[in-house]
Amino acid sequence: MLEISNLNAGYGTVQVLNDVSIKVPDRSVVTLLGANGAGKSTTLNTIAGLIKAWSGTIAYRGDECAGVPAHSLVRRGVALVAEQRELFLNMSVMENLMLGAFTRDDKAEIRESLEQVFEMFPRLAERRSQNTRTLSGGEQQMLAIGRALMSRPSLLLLDEPSLGIAPILVQEIFAQVRKINERGVAVLVVEQNAAIAMDVASYGYVMENGRISIEGPIETLRADPRIQEAYLGDGGH
């Protein structure tokens, strides 16, 4: 599905990513863990076409996509839920959702996707005409994920979905991430809350200072003393 090899990227003259290699197999959930500032968001933004790769390869379904514009990647099936959510706060819930379908033409299929989003997040159905600014942080996160799903992605990139959200809503959102994956969508999730990310993922990578320092199946990572000490102490926070 997605194969990144020796990826280097950054901002201006400042290098952030150093020879990063990550694989996300078809229909899998993979997590990218690491402290704040490790380079996790830069990785997702580079995959999504928002940051230009300096060198290395990003292959999506066998095709090189480094340098492909972000809107073209959405058409190919890659959707990013950014850390800041990037919602249009003065628009309604429904207007934000419909913007997610901007690459699609079939009205019946768009309506079907909308029904699936409302089934997944009933709060959005209840608040469909509400101004997005009035939603709670958790509801805005649901809306950001719902909007991404409206593009009918094959690969969903999730950047810190638990950030600033009440624990009960975090559980609800990650339960839906499982269901999204069960419908055949591959997910690459960046998280500081390692415990909850490991509950949904089958494979994980740990990033430190822009490099992958540890990787392996989730059960291997859980048993690694370095992971336990750095990420799984104090309930995983």
Image (tube, grey):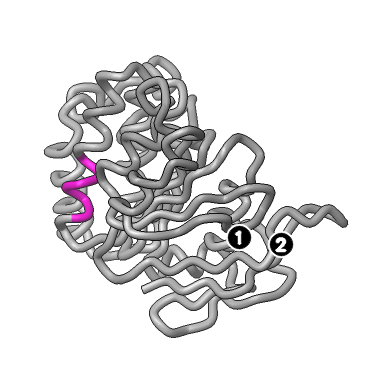
Residue 151 seen in the figure: no
Q: Which residue is mark 2?
A: 9
The amino acid at mark 2 is Ala
- 37 left or right, relative to 90: right
Question: Residue at the spot x=47%, y=33% of the render?
Answer: 229
Question: Residue at the spot x=58%, y=46% of the render?
Answer: 41
In front of the other: 92 or 30 = 30
Looking at the rendered structure, the secondary structure element under dot 1 is helix
Looking at the rendered structure, the secondary structure element under dot 2 is strand
Res. 181 image quadrant:
bottom left
Decide: few, some or many residues near mark 1? Use Cα within 10 Å; few <14, some 14-19, many ≥20.
Answer: many
Image coordinates for residue 77, horizontal then vertical, percent: 37, 66
Q: Residue furthest right?
A: 13
Can you say which quadrant of the picture contains the N terminus?
bottom left
Q: Which mark is residue 46?
A: 1
Cα distance between the residues tagged 2 and 1 = 8 Å
Main SS, magenta region, reads: helix
Task: Give the magenta part as a residue range.
Answer: 176-181
The amino acid at mark 1 is Thr
Image coordinates for residue 71, horizontal then vertical, percent: 51, 63
Question: Residue at the spot x=53%, y=34% of the render?
Answer: 84
Q: Is residue 43 above or below residue 132?
A: below
In front of the other: 40 or 218 = 218
Q: Is residue 25 above or below residue 220?
A: below
Instruction: Tell me whether the residue at label 2 lies in contact with that at label 1, contact meaning CB atoms closer than 8 angstroms.
Output: yes
